[in-house]
Each structure stands twice: as C-alpha cells, then as structure tokens.
Amino acid sequence: MKRVKIIGLIVFAITAMLFFTNSNNGQAAPQQRNIILATTTSTQDSGLLDVLLPVFEKKTGYFVKTIAVGSGQAMAMGQKGEADVLLVHSPDAERKFIAEGFGINRRLIMHNDFIVVGPVHDPANIKSIKSAEGKKMAVESLIKIGSSGALFLSRGDNSGTHAQEKKLWKAAEINPDGQKWYQQTGLGMGQTLSIAGEKKAYTLADRGTYLAMKKNLGLDILVEGDAVLLNVYHVIEVNSGRWPKVNAAGAKAFADFMASGEAQALIKNFGINKFGSPLFFPDAGKNWKTWEHEEWN
C-alpha cells in the first residue's frame, strides 16, 4: 500500500510538471500571473482581443484582465498605477504620458483608420465631397454637418477617437459645444455607433469597430481615405519605477507578444474571413516617420 502511494505521488508530480511546462511552452510559470490591460474600446468591440489574448495566455501562463475604456481613461489609469500595460491610439496624449514618466517602451503595433459614418439618406450630403487625393475631406464634411444642423454624435469620453474629432472641429473652425445638433454620449465606440444608428446621426468611428457592427447599424461610410484620419495604436508599459506594484514582467511579456511575428500575423488576418478585408494592419518594427510618409502622403 505504501509503495502504491509513493508511485501515486510521483505520477502526480510528473503530471503537474508537464502541465506547467506545456502550458507555457517550456517557460517557468510567472510568479505574478495577473496582468491588467487598459485599452481603447475599439480593440474590444472589434473582437480583436478575443483572438489575441487566448494565444498570449496559453503561451505565457499569464491571465489578462482587460479594462476597455477610452485611450484617455486608459492613460489616466496608468498615471495612477492602476494598470500594468496600455494599448491605446492617441499619439499626442501618449507622448505626454511618456514624457511625464508614467510609461516606458512605447511601441508601434498596428493601424487602421477613422471614418465618418452616417445615415444612408445623408441629410448633410457629405458623401458628395470630392477632394484631390482625399485631402481635407474630413474637415469639409464637418463643416457641412454643422451648417446643415444634422445630428452629430460625439463619444465625448476623452478617448483617442474623441481627441481626433476635436482636432477636426478645430481645423473646421467650429465650436460644436452647446449646439442642438451636437450631442455627446460619454460612451465607448460600439455603444456610440449603436446610438448613432438608432438616431440616424453622423459620428466619427474607427473602421474596425464599424465593420464588426455594420450589419446592425443602418449607417454607411460617407467619408474615408483622408490622411488626417490615420488611426495608430501603440503598446506602452506602465513605469514600474514610479509604481512598484505594477507587474513589470507581465507588461513586458504582453508588449513583446504584441510586437511578435505570431501576434502580427493574427492582426494581419483578423477580419478577412468575415468582412473580406482586415480590420487592422500590423506595423511592429516599422519606422514611424518613413511609414507614415509612404502610406498616407
């Protein structure tokens, strides 16, 4: 009986070792297994994270808790040490976040683009806007929306999308705040699109979330291709030197994974089977300034 118990313990120990080895591809199980990812709602609403996170978790043994908010709110969490790693798309705010010492190792991961969507009947007639090489179409569309009084919904949540929208209004020399035709939802991209569909309103959206929800919206893409509508995503590790409780190893593991060939291939192919085209385009390792000039100018 004693011999049987000993054999049983040995088998249990071997099984446990094999489990942890296989689940982490030969890596030792991380000491701090949980990672808090603060990210923009577009990566969640589009379904991209549903593809990426299971692969990362199986590969590394980490478990990711995702908090999908606007990029501004995600960075606010980082400023308080309430997240380990960020996946965001608000370049000006990101640079400020890094400069103030809240984040480290900002890496280019992917891009898609913003689009202006609205009701099929297009009351402001913005689809008719034609401009050489797609320049200034976005700004001109907002001028027409404002002058027509057609309803425009803003996320109003300090997200990357909201930041881009405010830039466009400024370029159009229009202050929409307080106008009857301008309403702020204070919500994420998916919820704002749903409300825009219900109210037959215009809004600025990222292409990925729109395509993922298009079937149920009743909204068309009315303006696209303008260089100012470029939408770029970076991963940023929260600075553990400032917040010692941050899971620095987990944050780096996630950032490394997002920049890896495996994750970039998943990003490249995401959406093709369902929508006929990718929802995001992989960019890890590219020179930002060279890439921006070649692709969008």
Image (cartoon, helix red, strand yellow):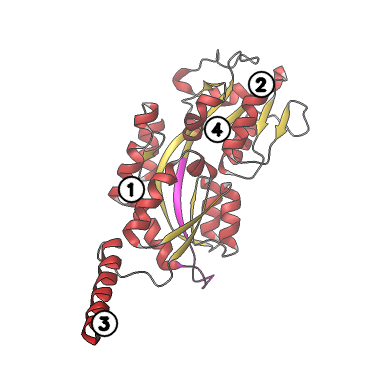
> Which of label 1 and label 3 is nearer to you?
3
The residue sitting at 58% across, 48% down in the picture is 69
Mark 1–mark 3 Cα distance, whole angstroms, equals 45 Å
Numbered tag placed on residue 145 in the rendering: 2
Q: Which residue is mark 3?
A: 5
Q: Which residues are magenta?
A: 232-247
Real-space Cα separation, disc 2 to disc 1, in angstroms = 39 Å
Q: Quadrant of the C terminus?
A: top left
CA gap, disc 4 and disc 2: 16 Å
Q: Earlier in the sequence, mark 4 or mark 2?
A: 2
Residue at the image position 57 percent from the left and 63 percent from the top:
82
Residue 62 percent location from the top left of the image: 40, 62
Give the quarter of the image for residue 174.
top right
Return the x and y of residue 271 as percentages of the image width and height. 38, 33
Local secondary structure at mark 3: helix
Find disc 4 in the rendering and name its residue: 205
The local crowd at label 4, few if under 14, some if 14 to 19, many if 20 or more residues have their Cα within 10 Å, is many
Is residue 223 toward the left or the right of residue 294 in the image? right
User: Circle 4 sits in a helix, a strand or a loop, which is it?
Assistant: strand
Is 115 inside the magenta-drawn segment?
Answer: no
Left or right, residue 237 beside residue 59: right
Looking at the rendered structure, the number of numbered marks drawn on it comes to 4
Alpha carbon of mark 3 to alpha carbon of mark 2: how far? 78 Å
Q: Would residue 145 appear left or right of 178 to someone viewing this image?
A: left
Q: Tell which residue pokes out farthest to the bottom in this image.
A: 2
Tell me the CA gap for discs 4 and 3: 62 Å
